[in-house]
Amino acid sequence: MNLLHLFLLALIQGITEFLPISSSGHLILLPNLTGAEDQGQVIDVAVHVGTLGAVILYFWSDVKTALIGTPRMLTGRLDTVGAKLAFLLLISTIPVILFGLFLEITGLYDHLRSITVIGWTMLIFGLILYWADQSGAEDKRSDDWTTRDAIIMGLWQAIALIPGTSRSGITITAGRFLGYDRESAARLSMLMSIPTIIASGVFAGAEVIAEADAEAARDGAIAAGLSFLAALAALALMFKLLKSVSFTPYVIYRVALGLVLLWIAYT
C-alpha cells in the first residue's frame, strides 16, 4: 500500500475515532468514494491500535486508577475508586461485544457497509446528538457515574456497530441525555472506548495474524504511528473546544455529509 493511502487512512482514523463523526463510516467511505483498494483487516487493526495508544496516554491517570483497582474488582470488592471504575467500564462493554458477535454470526454487518446506511446514520444520529446536547441537563460529572448509567451508555454504544453512527457520538449522546455535562460525557465516552477497541482488536486478531507478512507489518506500523499522532491531536483539540463550544459544529458536519451521501446513494 502506498504511503499516501496509508497517511489518509491513519489521518481519518485518528481524527474521527474520538470526534462524534464516525471513524468506521469514514474508513468505509474512502474506498467506496475514491475507488482505492480496501485497506483490509491488518491496517484496520493497526490504526485502531494507534488510537488506543493515544486515548490511554491522554487519560493515563484514569487508566492507571482502573488498572490498580482491577484486582479488587475481580474479587467482587468495589470499595475503591479504581475498582468501581474498572467494573463500570467492564459492564459498559458487554452490550457491544454481544451485539458484535450477533452481527458477525449472522453476517448482517457486511450488509450495513453501504453509502445509503452511512448517509442515514450520519443524518439521524447527528440530529439526535443535537437534541441531547441542547436539552440535556448538566448536573452530573464523570465521578457520578453509576452502574445504571454505565449499562445505559453501554447499550447505546452497541448501536455504534452500525457504520456511520459513531461510537463516541452515540455514547456522548447517551451521556448528555443522562444529565452529564459536555466534558464529562466526552470523558466517559473516551474511557469506554478503551475496552471496546481492545475487544474489537481481539476479534480481528486471528485474521490479522493469518494475513500478516513483512510488508503488511511495515504498513501496519506506519499506520499505527500516524493514527496515534492524529488521535492525540484530535483529543486535545476536542477537549479544549468543549470548554467554550457545544457539539453543534460536529452535528452540522454530520448532517451535511449525510445529505450528500444520501444524494449520491439515491441518484
Image: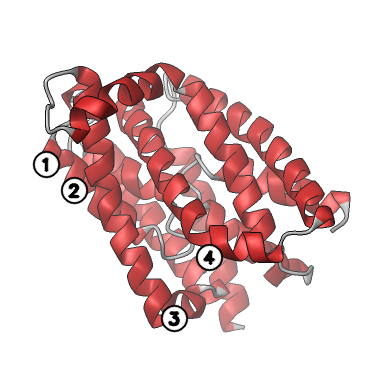
Q: Position of residue 16 (x, y in %)?
A: 57, 45
Disc 2 from disc 4: Cα separation: 29 Å
Residue 15 at least partly seen: no
Of pointers 2 and 3, the one earlier in the residue sequence: 3
Of pointers 1 and 4, the one earlier in the residue sequence: 1
Q: Which residue is mark 2?
A: 152
Disc 2 from disc 3: Cα separation: 26 Å
Residues at circles 1 and 3 in contact by the CB criterion of under 8 Å: no
Q: Which residue is mark 3?
A: 107
Locate the N terminus by quadrant.
Answer: bottom right
Q: Amino acid at mark 2?
A: Ile
Compare residues 247 and 51 and report the one nearer the observer: 51
Disc 3 from disc 4: Cα separation: 27 Å
Q: Amino acid at mark 4?
A: Leu
> Which mark is on residue 148?
1
Q: Amino acid at mark 1?
A: Arg
Of pointers 1 and 3, the one earlier in the residue sequence: 3
